[in-house]
Image (cartoon, rainbow, N blue to C red):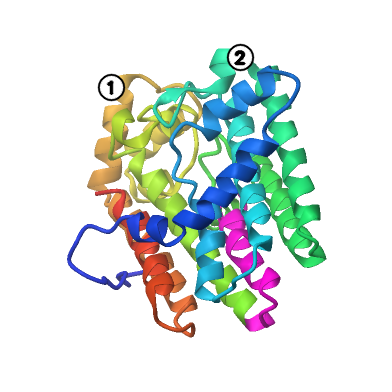
Amino acid sequence: MSATVQRLSGHQPSLDPMIHLVADDMNQVNAAIVDRMQSDIPLIPELANHLIGSGGKRMRPMLTLASARLLNYDGGRHYGLAAAVEFIHTATLLHDDVVDGSDLRRGKRTANIIWGNPASVLVGDFLFSRSFELMVEAGSLSALKILSNASAVIAEGEVNQLTAARRVDLGEDRYLEIINAKTAALFAAACRIAAVVADRPESEEAALDAYGRNLGIAFQLVDDAIDYTSDAGTMGKDAGDDFREGKMTLPVILAYARGSEEQRQFWKDAVEGRRDSDADFAHAIELVRSTRAVDDTIARARHYGQRAIEAIAPFADGTAKDAMIEAVEFAVARVY
């Protein structure tokens, strides 16, 4: 797990190259998003815009657009599909915040705190419905199959995570299974559908799927590490949310496996909800650092990031490929 992500240059990586690459295309996607989140019921666009308009990077639809650029696709069928990807993502966030009881998302109060759980769940359902309308309108049964399957897999991953909550015996394999479903599946689908609408061979579909899947795993690994290394201003959520919710993320899994009997008892108490004070969280941070659990979580993120980069190696060099490589670098570098 010692692979390092290749650097394009010595500068701090960012999403700027990808943002510039797909800027014109994103205008089309954003127009579709704004149009399809409208409703005669005022609460629906109000609540949806609270999250959709809150300054998220929209990385997943950008990946659809960037993948299309990588393939030199010059049609427009991917615009609606990219909007569908964003609606799926937003719907899952609305539902996740209800399940987790989260107070903060992207630095703002969550929709469930402002409007309540029922409204958040129902507007999430509305956005899922809109996403399927957009999929059908794209006129591709293959794209519909890919995105509808991803939606089901995401839901399975969330249920898997729910049943694994507060289980100190959760192993690394099941953890990776969970994040592969709840996070990486949509990254993979977002990239793969570009090859479908561009009528490219199965090998290119598979390559883009592998790029997105490995990027998604790296992205989630870094997110889980950030919970023990950052603050609310950087994260856009409360530091220690995962800790207080009893989530067995990889830093905790590794720290628990490497800990003394006393340390293991602390983790058991914490995961089961008996140690959740600020002092307990500070102690948890010390344990994940002293056992190198965070370092090794980031090392694994780099490993998956390298796999993402290698997946698109066969494609022609150019600005699209460079931007997609730097997006991987950015995903891993967020922890620093």
Q: Which mark is residue 279?
A: 1
Magenta stretch: give its range.
180-203
Left or right: 231, with 209 as reference point? left
Identify the amino acid type marked 2.
Answer: Trp
Mark 2–mark 1 distance (CA, rounded to whole Å): 32 Å
Foreground pick, 228 / 80: 80
Foreground pick, 249 / 46: 46
Residue at x 70%, y 77% (from the top left corner) = 199
Identify the amino acid type marked 1.
Answer: Ala
Is most of the magenta stretch helix, strand or loop? helix
Left or right: 201, with 139 as reference point? left
Residue at x 78%, y 67% (from the top left corner) = 142
Examine the structure image and report whether residue 193 is included in the region drawn in magenta.
Answer: yes
| 159 up-or-down from 137: above or below | above
Left or right: 30, with 249 as reference point? right
Residue at x 42%, y 73% (from the top left corner) = 321
Residue position for label 2 = 115
**Which comes sooner in the sequence, label 2 or label 1?**
2
Residue at x 73%, y 61% (from the top left corner) = 146
**Residue 226: horizontal and vertical position, in percent?**
34, 42
